[in-house]
Structure formats: structure tokens, C-alpha cells
Image: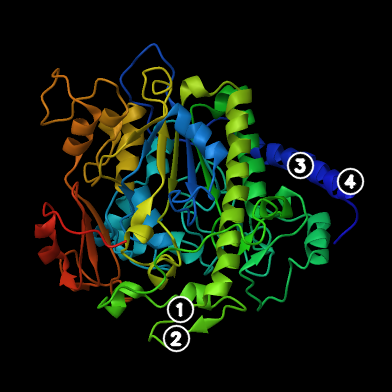
Amino acid sequence: MPGSTSSSRLLRAVFSVSLLTSSFERLTAVASGPTSGPAYSAPLTSEAPMNVLMIVVDDLRPPVSALQPTPNIDRLKAAGVSFSRAYTQIATCSPSRTSALTGLRPDKTHVWSIGPYFRTTMGRRKGLSTVTLPQLFKENGYNTTGSGKVFHPGSSSGSEYKSEGGGDMPYSWSIPYFFCDQFYNGTVQSTAAQGYPNGSGCVQSDECLACLEAEGAITDKKAKPAWSAPACPDDCLPDGLVATNVVAELEYAATHESARPFFIAAGMKRPHLGWFAPDTSYAKYPNGSVELAAHRTPPSGMPKLAFGDNGEMVAMDDIPVDDSSGYPLVVDWKQHELRMAYYSSVDFMDKSVGRVLDAMDVHGLWDSTVVVLWGDHGYHLGEQGIWCKSTNFEAGTRVPLVVATPDTASNGMGGTTSGALVELLDIYPTLVDLASLGSEAPTNLQGRSLRPLLESEAAPAGLGAGKPRSRREIDRAFSTAAYSQFARTSSNTLSDDDGIIGCVSISTPAARRCSVPAPAAACRRHRSQPKRVHR
């Protein structure tokens, strides 16, 4: 262990101050105001345009255990509406994010795996004319900035490099994107850290590198530890660095009129593997305190396609596997350790989100800002014998989603939970609606605005305006189904209706159906049939 506890605390304080300073220097690029684009065309009102803070979390499943507390996300829930039945369109990072940020299903973006870029897969005309969520705000006078993992980095978002850069620049953001990911060996991953021309993003300080190396958290480049608990400052790791940058962006926006209205996106890396988090987060989960999943073997008769191969987990170092059943199952004794590591990284992510929410408090931004937090897909922690994502089980497709507006804190909706069937596709039209940019939105968006579910007197179409309805009735009337799919062919060359989808999940108000396999067109007819839930 490096040094004493007091020296570790001093390092944490020094790093926080120096990184905040560097973030302010970066933000001077917006002093002259947002880049050119169509004038803000929302209906004229006496109020200023609504700001947006969007927080995207990687690999975060909805809480299913008291061992996964998120006190800071709970602060956001207390101010807004949580959606308990929100689903991703595909349980893999890049396709899910591409779908949510374009407002289009994977069969429109033609992105079903990590690597392809929607502006290429959709064809030159459709790809270049597609307007992303942050791009729409940028083109309507907003200063749009992004930090961390929002779009999947690398070739998936337009970079010439496989894993760094991209970010859908220059389309989506007003200033250079703040890339901040992490290699499995503990070093940060950004075009700036890798020294690429015109690189931007996070860079670990010499002090951080020394601390992480002393703690054994920086390893050989070929190593892939599943977790690490270094006694180093938060800002030595991606979520701490992202939080510092976003805090600086919020302060700059609050104190510089040229940076408003703003659309600020923060992408948290954890709880993605490897689970690197400060020792203070791991200290909350002593040995023996973490339970295992109740059902740790594949259901009888389950198609192999529905299982996947646990490839992401078994590719990590020191993961013992029992394949006597025909499936690569992580042995029980290792699962205690892995679940402890996942929960610890959730704790670190939540702490980082808390720093961002604290900045909202300090600068009095809640009355002028819509805040949305969402996860890109669910996550297995041994349920059905599965680890990580890339399935169509409930654990793989259900996501956390919270929306807080200036109104939800005062109209009685703050702290409530909606059971309506909703999708990540709904985020785009929701934010557009809340910012009064509906007339500027693309006409081909495939989601629906959640605004009726945020209002205390809501009566969605079909319920009859003005008639008293219970929240349960409103939730059930909002949507009859949510659709998830996995997996397509790896070629990413199929048309909207051709080819075989490995599994299409249709969540209905009654339950959930997984059709394996079936053509896309054939699966759609099951949308209103109540079926059993595979958990």
C-alpha cells in the first residue's frame, strides 16, 4: 500500500483542484457562444430555453438487491419520475446507444454490434442526414458538450481508430468531445492520453499513475483483471475524471451566458468491466456480505442462442469456469467476489453522479434544467448462469431510467415510479418535447414522448382528456409493448425486413415473450399477447 492514509487524502485533494483547473481551461473554447446552426425556433415564451443534463451509465442494471444502494441516484429519483419497466432495444453498448441517440431502432440504424457507425451503415444519404439528439439541440442554439462514454467510442462513432475518439464529431457537439474510457490494464483511454493528433479527453497525472502502479492497479497491457481496489484519488479513474469535467462545465454554463442554453452529456464508465474503483467503495462490501443469484443455471431446454457464451466475463483473468453442463459457467466461489466487485463499482459511479448533482445544487440549476439518467442495457450477475449483457432475458434488457424536470419537483410527481412500458427510444422525443423543440424534431423518430407520464393530470391519447384516471390506468394505456432484439448477423448488411433475428423480446403489460428465432416481420404480430416472463 502506498504511503499513509493522510498522504492519500492529500493526493486526492491536490488532484481535484488541478483537474478542475484544466477543465476550466478547456471550456474557454465556448466563450464566444455556440457554433452556428438554425436559430432557436421553439414557441416564443417569457421563459428561457430549458437546459438539459443527460447522464448515461454503462452496464448498470436496475437495483434488484439491497446490496446495490445508489443514494445519489436516489436523490434524482426523489426529484423526478423513475420508470420501472424501461427497456433497451438491444443489450449491447454501441447498438443501444446508437438507437437511443438517433431515436431509431437497430433495424433502421443497421447497427447490431460494436464497430459499425450508423452514418455509414445507413447509407451515405440517410446516414449523413440523420440528426442525433445532441445534434438537434446544437442546431437549435444550444451549447452541446459531452464527456466520457455517451456514444460508444472508436469506429462505432466515426473514429479512424478502433477504440478511441469518434463521438460523432463534428455533428453532435459544439466543442471537442472529452473522451474518457479505460483500458483493462488500468490506464485511461482517450485520444489525448494516447497522444493522437488533435486529441482530447482525460489524461492521468503522473501522481495518479504512480499511485495506481504502487497499488498494483496498472498492469501489463495484455492483462485483464476483473477488478481492482486501489487506494488512490477518485480522479485517477474515468468516472472521477468525467465528474470533474462535467462539474466544471456546469459551473462555466452557470456563470457564462454564452454557454447557455446547454445540453451537457456525462457518460459514466462504471460498472463496466474491469471493475476498478477506489478502496473506499470496496470497503463497503466485506467478504461474505454479498449473496449469489437464486437461479444460477440455464433454464431447461433453453436455446444456446439465448444464453450467449459468457465471452466477456471468461475473457477476464483468473475466471474459473465449469463447462460440464455444456455451458461455460463461472464457479460459485468466484461469483461472491465478482458480485462484490460489481456493487463496489456501482458505488463509485453513484458517488461520481453525486458530485454532478452537487454542482446542480451549488449553481441553482434545477429550476431551469431537465435531468435524465439512463443505462444502456441491463446486466446479468450469474442469473441463468449468465454474466454481463448480450441477452434478451429481463436482466439483460431492463434498464434504469429517471427523468426529473423543474415541474416534477412541485407537481407531486417527484419521487414516484411509473410502471408504463417505455423504451430508450423514448428519451429523444421526450427531451425534445420538454425543451419545446418538437417542431424541429426529425419526423422519423420511433419513440414516444414520456411527458404525459411526468404530469400529474396527464391523460394520454385513448384515455379521454379531462377524465379522472389512476396512475396505473395511465401507465397501462401509454404503450402496449416494448421491443428488444439480440442478435443479428455480424455482417450488418441486412435490410429492414430481411434476415433472421436471433431473438426478439416483446414486453407487454401482462408479461414478456421471447421468440427464438424468427424473421423481424414475423415477430411483430406477437406484440399484444401476454406471455410468461423468463427471468
Secondary structure at numbered mark 3? helix
Q: CA distance from mark 3 to mark 4?
A: 16 Å
Kind of residue at disc 4: Ser
Residue found farthest to the top:
46
Q: Which circle marks residue 16 in the picture?
A: 3
Q: CA distance from mark 1 to mark 4?
A: 43 Å
Which image quadrant for residue 112? Answer: bottom left
Q: CA distance from mark 2 to mark 3?
A: 46 Å
Front-most of residues 223 and 341: 341
- Of callouts 1 and 4, the N-terminal one: 4
Q: Residue at x 45, y 59 (%)?
A: 157
Per the image, the residue denoted by label 1 is: 329
Colouring used for the render: rainbow
Q: Which circle marks residue 6 in the picture?
A: 4
Tags 2 and 1 touching, CB below 8 Å: yes
Kind of residue at disc 3: Ser
